[in-house]
Amino acid sequence: MIAFPKFEFLEAAASLLYPPVCTICGGKVRSGEYLCDQCEAKAVRIVAPFCLKCSEPFEGAISTPFTCANCAHRTIYFDAAVAAYRGRGIVRQIIHDFKYRRQIHLRYLVARWLCAAFDDERLRGQQFDILIPVPLHPARQRERGFNQATLLAELLSKQISIPFKPLLKRVRYTTTQTALDRAERMENLHNAFRLRKNITVQGLRVLLIDDVLTTGSTLSECARILKRAGAISVHAATAARA
């Protein structure tokens, strides 16, 4: 059984490169931090009740496990996808700045949010053999300059001492998912991924890593490929749930 400690920044030198001010409001922060206490408090954790499959929060009073409309009437290939924070407000802004404005140093903050997912009983105490980041298509990665999931998986791997390897490859360039509904996302992603050559996941317990979970279609398609190749189980962890 694996113990998952609280996430600590892995590069103290980062605090020397960036001034100790809040990324959001510019207020003073402690050394090694990126948000002041007031802004940090605006990052909303996902708490029960939520869908046990995809972490979609339920706005209302419910005390029994349930499957949300997002997961109903479709096959989901991952065992569970756990997201730590709501992907809105400050969380959305930080992730957007990290991914699209090349503020790479913010990966430490996003990785800390990602590590909070291990407080969830669906991941706590699980045994994983490998972390696999969700891949970008090579053209999109060249355009962005990096794959955010790979950067997060690298930090998480150091924290929990589980190897990460980019075993999946995105072989089909897909249009952006943001404007598509659930069914369109699933169709858009079908056969978009494959295992890299000379790779086996036979008998492995896999943890997929990404920054944001929206409908779970990307994670589900990755899990389908991995399970078809012999993975025993595929869970997923993300920093936020859109």
Image: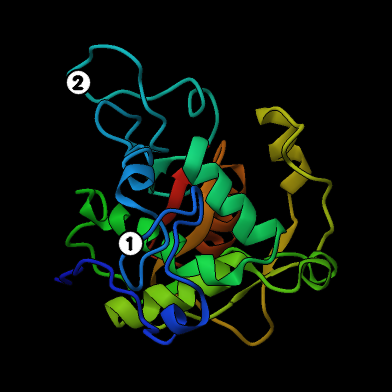
Give the quadrant of residue 205. Answer: bottom left
The residue at the point 55 percent across, 30 percent down is: 74
At x 35%, y 82%, the residue is: 158
Q: Is residue 144 visible?
A: yes
Front residue of 196/159: it is 159
Q: Position of residue 103 (x, y in %)?
A: 62, 66
Q: Residues within 10 Å of mark 1 (few under 14, many from 20)?
A: many
From the image, state whether disc 2 or disc 1 is nearer to you: 1
Q: In the drawing, does residue 22 fall left or right of residue 172?
A: left
- Residue at 73% from the left image edge and 48% from the top image edge: 190
Query: What SS does tag 1 mark?
Result: helix
The residue lying toward the viewer, choosing from 18 and 49, is 18
Q: From the top left corner, tell me how far across and down residue 196 is, in percent.
A: 67, 79
Q: Name the residue under label 2.
A: 64
Question: Mark 1 sits on what residue?
Answer: 115
- Give how far apart the Cα atoms at labels 2 and 1 are: 26 Å
- Amino acid type, residue under disc 2 in the picture: Thr
Horizontal relation, residue 191 to residue 215: left or right = right
Q: In the rendered structure, which disc, 2 or 1, sits on the residue that comes first in sequence?
A: 2
Element carrying mark 2: loop
Q: Which amino acid does label 1 sit on?
A: Cys
Label 2 Cα crowd, 10 Å radius (few <14 / some 14-19 / many 20+): few
